[in-house]
Amino acid sequence: MSDFSLEQSVLNLNGHVVTGWSDDTDGLSLPNMDIANIVRGASGKMVAVSTGDKGGPLTIKLLPNSNSVPFFMNLVTAQKNGASITYSGYYRDPINGINVALIKGTMTNAPQGPTLGKGTAANMEFTIEFESTVADYIAVNFS
């Protein structure tokens, strides 16, 4: 049996290795992408229409005292002041054999500053929408 922890994985964005993951259950989220839309005609026949979607949002939740928070907040400030910031990098999970290339992203959601509250309410959440994500799955022996 293998135990998964984000501390065992690596998320590298623009050369920065992200650290200080939130301790709630979803510190990192890269949801499924829509690859086709289904259209049904009046007769009930179905047609699948490819979306061309190759990317999606990556949501990162960090502890407020994480070393990665200043990295992201500096880029958020630059983006709010008109800078064009593009993100690229990779996510590697050696426990489950997952590697994901993250290509051409832009920050779409970020905190305005330190969040107030305790526990998970104080976590800092950032969302980056990527034009393309390419996953590579490597066979892992769980014995």
Image (cartoon, rainbow, N blue to C red):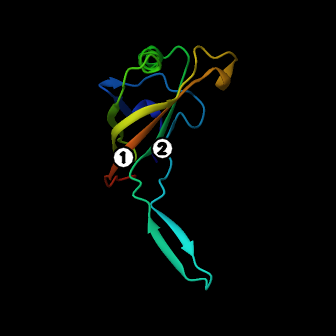
Residue 100: give x, y in percent of width and height. Answer: 35, 44
Report, in whole angstroms, how far the alpha carbon at label 2 lies from the one at label 1: 9 Å
Task: Give the labeled residue for mark 1.
Answer: 133
Q: Residue at x 50, y 26 (%)?
A: 21
Compare marks 2 and 1 and give the one earlier in the sequence.
2
53 or 125: which is nearer to us? 53
Tell me the residue at 40%/25% (across/down): 18
Hey, what amino acid is under mark 2?
Answer: Leu
Please state the total of marks drawn on the protein image: 2
Relative to 109, does residue 47 appear above or below in the rendering?
below
Does residue 86 appear left or right of residue 45 in this picture? Answer: left
Is residue 60 shown left or right of residue 11? Answer: right
Residue farthest along the bottom direction in this orientation: 43
Residues marked 2 and 1 touching at CB (< 8 Å): yes
User: Disc 2 designates what residue?
Assistant: 30
Instruction: Pick whichever, 136 or 36, lies toward us.
Output: 36
Q: Quadrant of residue 99?
A: top left
Q: Position of residue 62 (x, y in %)?
A: 52, 24
Vertical placement of residue 53 versus 71, above or below: below
Which element is circle 1 on? Answer: strand
Q: Position of residue 1 (x, y in %)?
A: 46, 48
